[in-house]
Image (cartoon, rainbow, N blue to C red):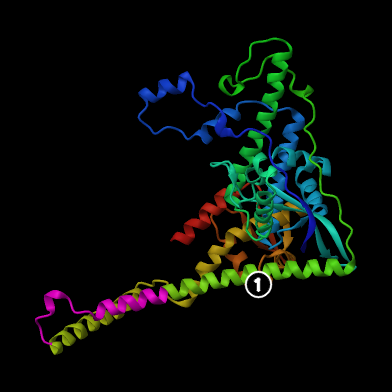
């Protein structure tokens, strides 16, 4: 896909979590008696915000946000950075069993505008081969500990009121924005950050609700208090009566001709190629640096130590020859001992270890297949074909998948079982076994 010229990246109007006062009397008393290190401000804020309840409509919105994050991370694993809204809509609805519309997306963008980049993307339809523009969504990395973008896409911090008065400064800021837009769609979303992003989304909802709560107290001339400190709202405050979240406007669809769409697709391909070339240059420079280090080590080995300089050159050569001979003999003895003890130092052991390392991805993919099909057993041939079709590696062969499934059936947790039926082999999955337990056993096999 290619990036359209019309896009939107909205900025947040909510206050930063660093502006909140997290110190209380109870925490100050604990600091005097407790010897453990102090809890970070972000962890303390998450713990306090989790105690406060949310309205039912906002709880459903949070569930849709979690499903949206999971779907975007899965699409990114398949090298699809600009995901069509139609695909997202169908995926989120299948996970949450609730309707997901553009209105929900606009509400999510109002709460966390610095999480996503929305734009119209040029693409080619696989069925009709028609070139058209589709509304797409791209996830951006966000660091909650510094409360800013890691991709340097925080436009709100770049444009100030003083800069708007000066045209030259404003043009320089626009140039920076253009350079930042070039980085959109070139970085993967880390799966380990999904939980942190969910905490940020819930805390933003708590901030919105706290604003309504503060306004409600002022209208009734009641004493103001901080719900984060008390851990509860006012007893007469009706959560379900809170007004809806304001909608963020989505970008309008630009009018593009077929030739312009073709140029956009070519530009996007060139952009991805530049990213690949940059990564290849980085790897080549790293390999060159390693070669230079090895050359420097060889030069250091050739240097005669100060305590041996009084010896003749021939004697020094004999000493080095004996050291090299000892090293070769020790290496041979170690190889013989490993072969006698049955140590897995051959090629088969390396292949087996690589299969164990690939099994966590196969487990998650296979569980998704069974859940989406609402089945607990499938013929082995059909399961292998489904895994082949959905695998992130398009070049994986059926024999390799079957070997991985056989290794998975040997686990002690009985998560996956292969049985011989009357006609074909049947692969059964135990959905009651947690994925976490399966991954722990696989990690133990990898470490051993």
Quadrant including the C terminus: bottom left
The region drawn magenta spans: 290-312
Residue pictured at 85% horizontal, 50% vertical: 252
Residue 167 in sight here:
yes
Residue 45 percent location from the top left of the image: 55, 31
Q: Position of residue 68 (x, y in %)?
A: 72, 47
Magenta span: chief secondary structure: helix
Q: Say whether residue 405 is left or right of residue 308.
A: right
Query: Residue 390: image x %, image y %?
Result: 72, 64
The residue drawn where x is 63% and y is 67% is 275
Residue 32 or 341: which is nearer the viewer?
32
Residue appearing at x 66%, y 60% in the figure = 77
Q: Position of residue 96 (x, y in %)?
A: 76, 43
What residue does disc 1 label? 396
Q: How many marks?
A: 1
Q: Quadrant of the N terminus?
A: bottom right
Residue 374 shows up from this direction: no
Queried whether the magenta region covers residue 64, the answer comes back as no
Q: In this view of the protein, which residue sits in the foreground, 86 or 296?
A: 296
Residue 292 is drawn in which quadrant?
bottom left
């Amino acid at each position: 896909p290619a990036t359209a010229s019309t896009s939107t990246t909205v900025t947040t109007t909510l206050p930063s979590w660093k502006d909140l006062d997290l110190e209380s009397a109870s925490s100050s008393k604990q600091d005097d008696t407790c010897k453990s290190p102090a809890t970070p401000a972000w962890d303390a804020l998450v713990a306090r915000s989790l105690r406060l309840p949310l309205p039912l409509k906002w709880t459903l919105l949070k569930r849709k946000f979690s499903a949206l994050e999971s779907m975007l991370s899965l699409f990114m694993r398949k090298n699809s950075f600009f995901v069509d809204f139609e695909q997202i809509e169908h995926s989120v609805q299948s996970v949450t069993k609730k309707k997901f519309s553009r209105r929900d997306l606009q509400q999510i963008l109002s709460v966390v505008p610095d999480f996503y980049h929305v734009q119209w993307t040029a693409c080619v339809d696989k069925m009709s081969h028609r070139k058209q523009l589709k509304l797409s969504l791209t996830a951006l990395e966000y660091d909650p500990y510094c409360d800013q973008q890691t991709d340097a896409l925080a436009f709100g911090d770049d444009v100030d009121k003083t800069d708007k008065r000066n045209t030259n400064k404003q043009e320089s800021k626009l140039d920076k924005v253009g350079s930042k837009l070039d980085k959109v769609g070139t970085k993967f979303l880390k799966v380990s950050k999904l939980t942190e992003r969910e905490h940020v989304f819930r805390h933003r909802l708590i901030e919105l609700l706290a604003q309504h709560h503060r306004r409600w107290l002022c209208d009734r001339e009641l004493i103001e208090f901080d719900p984060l400190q008390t851990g509860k709202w006012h007893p007469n405050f009706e959560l379900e009566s809170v007004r809806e979240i304001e909608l963020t406007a989505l970008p309008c669809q630009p009018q593009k001709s077929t030739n312009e769409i073709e140029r956009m697709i070519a530009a996007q391909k060139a952009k991805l190629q530049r990213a690949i070339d940059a990564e290849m240059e980085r790897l080549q420079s790293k390999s060159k640096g390693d070669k230079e280090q090895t050359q420097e080590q060889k030069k250091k080995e050739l240097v005669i130590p100060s305590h041996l300089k009084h010896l003749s050159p021939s004697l020094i050569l004999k000493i080095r020859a004996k050291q090299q001979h000892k090293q070769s003999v020790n290496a041979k003895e170690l190889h013989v001992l490993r072969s006698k003890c049955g140590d897995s130092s051959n090629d088969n052991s390396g292949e087996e270890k690589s299969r164990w390392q690939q099994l966590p991805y196969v487990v998650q993919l296979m569980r998704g297949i069974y859940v989406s099909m609402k089945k607990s057993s499938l013929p082995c041939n059909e399961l292998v074909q489904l895994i082949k079709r959905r695998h992130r590696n398009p070049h994986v062969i059926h024999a390799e998948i079957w070997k991985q499934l056989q290794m998975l059936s040997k686990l002690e947790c009985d998560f996956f079982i292969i049985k011989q039926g009357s006609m074909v082999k049947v692969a059964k999955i135990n959905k009651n076994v947690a994925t976490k337990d399966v991954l722990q056993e696989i990690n133990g096999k990898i470490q051993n």
